[in-house]
């Protein structure tokens, strides 16, 4: 990924607890070197912030968040 113009796509699933804190990250797919997936999870762990998910009755609950990261080296 350190090559100028290199890119990668990482699909991930993130688990959060009842207070919205990160509990786990799973890389579902990565288009490049195997190290970019775990690196992506480390970045998410440091930077991501979530409000707690709520049940219909307003009770905080665990949740799963899935998304994709597109990395582009400038």
Image: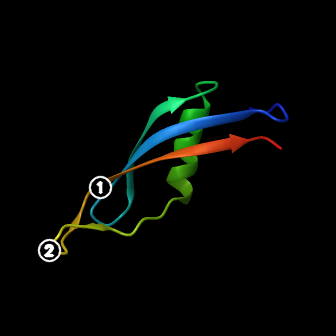
What residue lies at 58% left-to-right and 25% top-to-bottom? 34
Quick one: which residue is furthest to the top in this view?
Answer: 33
Q: Is residue 47 left or right of residue 1?
A: left
- Give the residue pinned by disc 1: 63
Do residues under tags 2 and 1 come within 8 Å of each other at their CB atoms? no
What residue lies at 49% left-to-right and 30% top-to-bottom? 29
Q: Is residue 16 left or right of residue 30?
A: left
Crowding near pointer 1: few (<14 within 10 Å), some, many (20+)? some
What residue lies at 82% left-to-right and 31% top-to-bottom? 3
Of the numbered discs 2 and 1, the one sitting upstream in the chain is 2
Where is residue 26 drawn, in percent x and y? 42, 37
- Give the residue pinned by disc 2: 57
Q: Classify mark 1: helix, strand or loop.
A: strand
Q: Quarter of the image containing the N terminus?
A: top right
Q: Classify mark 2: helix, strand or loop.
A: loop
Question: How far apart, in angstroms, are the residues tagged by discs 2 and 1?
Answer: 15 Å
Crowding near pointer 2: few (<14 within 10 Å), some, many (20+)? few
Q: Is residue 36 left or right of residue 15?
A: right
């Amino acid at each position: 990924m350190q090559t100028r113009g290199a890119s990668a796509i990482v699909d991930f699933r993130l688990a959060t607890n009842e207070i919205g804190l990160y509990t786990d990250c799973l890389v579902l797919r990565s288009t490049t070197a195997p190290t970019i997936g775990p690196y992506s999870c480390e970045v998410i762990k440091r930077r991501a912030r979530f409000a707690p998910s709520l049940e219909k009755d307003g009770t905080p609950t665990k949740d799963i968040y899935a998304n994709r990261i597109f990395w582009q080296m400038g």
